Amino acid sequence: MIEIVILYVLNKYDSTIYKVGRIIDELFFSYLKTSTGTINPALKRLEKMGCVECSEKMSDGGMLSKIYSITSGGKKHLIEELQRVELNNPYHVINNAKIALYCSDVLSINELLTFKENLLNQLELYKIKLERGLKNEYIQLTDTQKKTVEITLDEVNGLIKLL
C-alpha cells in the first residue's frame, strides 16, 4: 500500500523524500504513519520500475536535494494497482480499504467502476468471514470479543455503503 500512497502523492506534487513523508502524514493522518525508512526503499523500487524519476536540485540554502516525480508509467501503475488492490491481511483490511478509497480520485469514471467492484467484492467476503466468526459455535467468544468483532463489522458495512 505504501507504493500506492507514494505514487498518489507524487501524482500531485514533485517532492523530496522528506516532503513525501510530510505530505503522507498530512493527507493520510488518520490511516497511515510512515518513516523515511519505509519511504526510501519504496521510492527506490518505484524508480527501478520506471514509475518515478529523480532529479537533483540545489536548494536556496546551498544543499543538494533529490526531487522525485511520477512518470507516465508511474501514473499507469498507480491506476492499475488501485484497480486491483488486494485486502489480504485481516489486520489491515479496513485501513487499506480507506487508503485506497482516499486515493481513488485519480481514477476515471470507468476505472472507478472497476475499482469499486473489486473493493466491494473483497469487503463483502470479509464481512461474511466476520459474520461466520460471530456465529461459530466452536469458538467461545467473550462479550468483549464479540463487541470488538461487531465494531469491525459495522466499519465494513459503512465502507460497503460508501461504495
Image (cartoon, grey):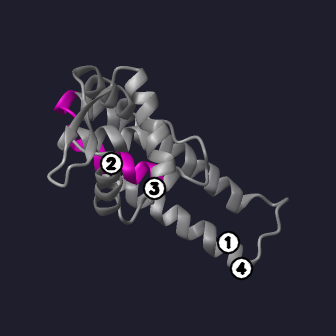
Q: Which residue is mark 2?
A: 101
The residue positioned 61% from the left and 54% from the top of the image is 91
Q: Amino acid at mark 2?
A: Leu
Q: Please tell me which of labels 1 and 3 falls first in the chain.
A: 3
Marks 1 and 2, how far apart at CA: 27 Å
* Mark 2 burial class by Cα count in 10 Å: few <14, some 14-19, many 20+: some
Disc 4 crowd rating (10 Å Cα; few below 14, some 14-19, many 20+) is few
Residue interval drawn in magenta: 95-110
Secondary structure of the residue carrying numbered label 1: helix
Q: Residue furthest right?
A: 138
For mark 4, what is the residue?
143
Q: Tell me which corner region of the image, top left, top right, bottom left or bottom right, holds residue 58.
A: top left
Query: Tag on residue 146?
Result: 1
Instruction: Identify the secondary structure beneath mark 4.
Output: helix
4 and 1 marks in contact (CB < 8 Å)? yes
Number of the label disc, if any, that sits on residue 41: none
Three-letter residue code for mark 1: Lys
Whole-angstrom CA distance, mark 3 to mark 2, is: 19 Å
The residue pinned by badge 3 equals: 34
Of mark 2 and mark 4, the one earlier in the sequence is 2
Task: Please indicate whether residue 144 sits to the left or right of residue 10 in the image.
Answer: right
Q: Position of residue 87 (x, y in %)?
A: 52, 42
Q: Is residue 129 magenta?
A: no
For the point 59% across and 49% down, the residue is: 128
Q: Is residue 26 above or below residue 87?
A: below
How far apart marks 1 and 3 lie (CA) works out to 31 Å
Which mark is first along the chain, 2 or 1? 2
